Image (spheres, rainbow, N blue to C red):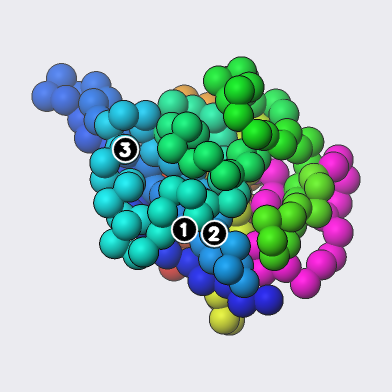
């Protein structure tokens, strides 16, 4: 199986003059697994639409080409606009509270870790250890920020890349082992960061530049 990874853009958090959070943009990635087009997170509804469509078009990819959307978690700045991707299956953990937002789309709820297979098939996530398959894309549980947070691991040549969503906000937070300020369980989130650090060579955080572990 051959996989390519293209980080469409790295997320960032902008702050207002008062110090409060203003514009929030998450990292968005495009994967190609033997011709199967996979998105990881979709950005903010409306605000990121034109930029996302432009980034895909510049790579000769149409929204109709996307077969899978893997959500790291279901917060508004990551959920985007599923209506733009009519042929996609939207995958997320069943513990995510905002899943009702996706009820009119084709979805798959998982309750454990899973592998992504060519053709858009999943080795279905179930509670318990991940089955060992020859798949270069796999999703692991990294709860804490939300209880259903997932990190997508991608094997690129000799390196494992972690598309971490908000399990890792930025390199600065990772070095300090500091979970996102808004986390449902900070101790669980810290353990998730530690796990990512043991598995990944490169991390694409939710709101910062890509960095090497």
* Residue pointed to by mark 3: 49
Which residue sits furthest bottom?
158
Task: Please tell me which residue is depicted at 29% across the width and 62% down the height of the picture.
Answer: 58
Q: Is residue 15 visible?
A: yes
Task: Please tell me which residue is depicted at 58% across the width and 68% down the height of the picture.
Answer: 35
Q: Secondary structure at mark 1?
A: strand
In the rendered structure, which disc, 3 or 1, sits on the residue that comes first in sequence?
A: 1
Using the rendered view, name the quadrant where residue 9 is placed.
bottom left
Near-viewer residue (204 or 104) = 104
Whether the magenta-drawn stretch holds residue 53 is answered as no
Q: Is residue 178 left or right of residue 170?
A: right
Q: Secondary structure at mark 3?
A: helix
Q: Give residue 30's mark.
A: 1
Whether the magenta-drawn stretch holds residue 131 is answered as yes
In the displayed structure, would residue 117 be above or below residue 77?
A: below
Task: Please tell me which residue is depicted at 35% across the width and 64% down the height of the picture.
Answer: 59
Q: Is residue 178 visible?
A: no
Rendered location of residue 201, percent (x, y): 54, 69
* Residue pointed to by mark 2: 37
Near-viewer residue (98 or 211) = 98
In the rendered structure, which disc, 2 or 1, sits on the residue that comes first in sequence?
A: 1
Mark pair 3, 1: CA separation: 15 Å
Label 1 near label 2: C-beta < 8 Å? yes
Rendered location of residue 129, percent (x, y): 86, 52
Mark pair 3, 2: CA separation: 18 Å
């Amino acid at each position: 199986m051959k996989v390519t990874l293209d980080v469409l853009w790295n997320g960032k958090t902008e702050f207002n003059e008062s110090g409060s959070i203003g514009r929030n943009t998450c990292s968005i990635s495009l994967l190609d697994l033997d011709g199967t087009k996979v998105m990881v997170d979709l950005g903010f509804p409306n605000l990121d639409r034109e930029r996302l469509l432009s980034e895909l078009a510049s790579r000769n990819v149409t929204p109709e080409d996307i077969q899978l959307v893997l959500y790291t978690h279901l917060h508004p700045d990551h959920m985007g606009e599923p209506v733009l991707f009519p042929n996609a299956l939207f995958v997320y953990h069943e513990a995510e509270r905002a899943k009702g937002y996706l009820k009119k789309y084709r979805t798959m709820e998982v309750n454990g870790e899973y592998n992504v297979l060519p053709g858009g098939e999943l080795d279905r996530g179930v509670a318990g250890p991940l089955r060992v398959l020859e798949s270069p894309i796999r999703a692991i549980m990294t709860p804490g920020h939300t209880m259903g947070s997932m990190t997508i691991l991608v094997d690129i040549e000799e390196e494992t890349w972690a598309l971490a969503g908000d399990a890792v906000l930025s390199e600065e937070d990772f070095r300090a082992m500091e979970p996102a300020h808004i986390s449902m369980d900070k101790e669980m989130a810290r353990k998730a960061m530690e796990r990512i650090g043991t598995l990944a060579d490169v991390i694409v955080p939710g709101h910062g530049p890509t960095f090497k572990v």
